[in-house]
Amino acid sequence: MSIIERKNKIILGTAQFGMNYGINNLKGKIPQNEINNILEYSYINGIRSLDTAEAYGTSINEIGEFHRLNPSHKFKIYSKLNPNQINDNFLRNLSSGLKKLSVDSYEGYMIHDFIKFKKTPELALNLFEAKKMGLIKKVGISLYSNEDIKDVINKFDFDFIQLPFNLLDNSFQRKNIIKDSNIEIHIRSIFLQGLFFMPSSLIPEKLKPLCKHITMLEEFAYKNNSTVEEIAIKYPFSKNYIDKIIFGVDNLIQLKRNIKIIDKPNSISYKKIDSIRVLEKELLNPSNW
């Protein structure tokens, strides 16, 4: 896979732009000047897509401010339905979001809450109607469990799904569900919200069962003359059944480091990572933390 192809797979996550996000985030929301630097560097280095949501604090406002200041550097936007805006004003709220972002349409728009969707499946009708109107190019849904993924793939006609995938929530957990699907696969949480980089002494007691796996990852990285950060980024790129890879950064330095990793050819075999089996699967979902 060429560098350009790898860059085309990336969607930069922006939760940190509008709120405190991640278990290992000690600095909180990113300042606007740093956001502008991150977006500028991303754009000129071939990353042209962003993942955001109304629920991400002021994230869409920060992105919109960058677009207004840099009209020639506009990103493709993937966003998510705000559960509090499911009403008769849906299309008005959708248009309002586009105005805030200073873009004409969403590249992709997702249902954020599968449980709510199952109770009110007509939510998708609103999104497909907006797609017909040209406000949305692709309609998707954000999921967590394999059961939900299988349910959606078999029963619904979404353009894409977004799901967690990382060194622990890995090919062993996910491959058989998604590898033969005809739906576009977007993956998130490649750093497990920064848990991979926390000192073991700071990992909350509830998550201690994951420590043995994180230690194994550190040993694997060391034996391969690499780092956990590098293998966390490279691992999903090694899977041809993954179409888009979402990750966020806390600052410009981190972004530059990640892009440098992405630009390097992969020379590591990930069969050992593929074989990791986390029995406490509920701990792989940050909403349970």
Image (cartoon, grey):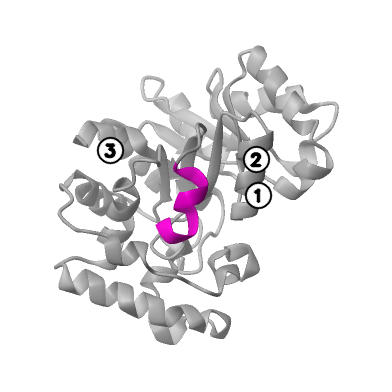
Q: Classify mark 2: helix, strand or loop.
A: helix
Task: Tell me: residue 163, above or below residue 62.
Answer: below
Q: Say which residue label 2 marks.
A: 152
Looking at the picture, how far across and down is residue 285, in whole percent? Answer: 58, 63
- Residue 6 image label: 3
For image coordinates 33% across by 65% down, the residue present is 273
In the rendered view, does 4 fall on the left or right side of 94? left
Looking at the picture, how far across and down is residue 179, in whole percent? Answer: 44, 43
Would you say the residues marked 1 and 2 are in contact, meaning their CB atoms lie under 8 Å apart? yes
Q: Front-most of 170 and 24? A: 170
In the rendered view, does 259 fall on the left or right side of 87? left
For image coordinates 78% across by 43% down, the residue present is 118
Magenta stretch contains residue 206: no
Magenta stretch contains residue 176: yes
Q: Which residue is farthest top?
A: 133
Task: Tell me: residue 8, above or below residue 175.
Answer: above
Residue 170 shows in the view: no
Q: Say which residue label 1 marks.
A: 148
